[in-house]
Amino acid sequence: MGASGIHVAEYLTVLPPRADLEAKLHEAIQSARNRIGGDADT
């Protein structure tokens, strides 16, 4: 946040490789399952 107090969002203009996105998604899903105790499909 700058001195003006305004937040500016940042957006990706170029997506990372699909394999990287899929790996991150799977990590996030596994992490969420571990947090809620639903470790089916492991």
Image (cartoon, helix red, strand yellow):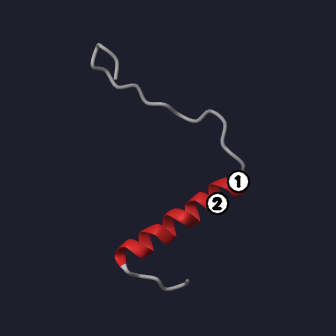
| Residue located 37% across and 72% down the image | 35
Residue type, label 2? Glu
CA neighbours of label 2 inside 10 A, class few (<14), some (14 to 19), many (20+): few
| Residue located 58% across and 58% down the image | 24
CA neighbours of label 1 inside 10 A, class few (<14), some (14 to 19), many (20+): few
Residue nearest the observer in this picture, 24 or 12: 24
| Residue indicated by mark 2 | 22
Residue 14, position in %: x, y? 66, 36
Q: Secondary structure at mark 1?
A: helix
Residue type, label 1? Arg
Q: How many marks?
A: 2
Tell whether label 1 touches label 2 (CB within 8 Å): yes
Residue 33, position in %: x, y? 43, 74
Note whether 29 is above or below 42 in the view shown.
Answer: above
Note whether 42 is above or below 6 in the view shown.
Answer: below
Q: Which corner quadrant holds the C terminus?
A: bottom right
Residue 18's tag is 1
23 relative to 32 in the view: left or right: right
| Residue located 41% across and 82% down the image | 38
6 relative to 19 in the view: left or right: left
Residue 26's tag is none
Residue nearest the observer in this picture, 14 or 39: 39
Residue 28, position in %: x, y? 50, 63
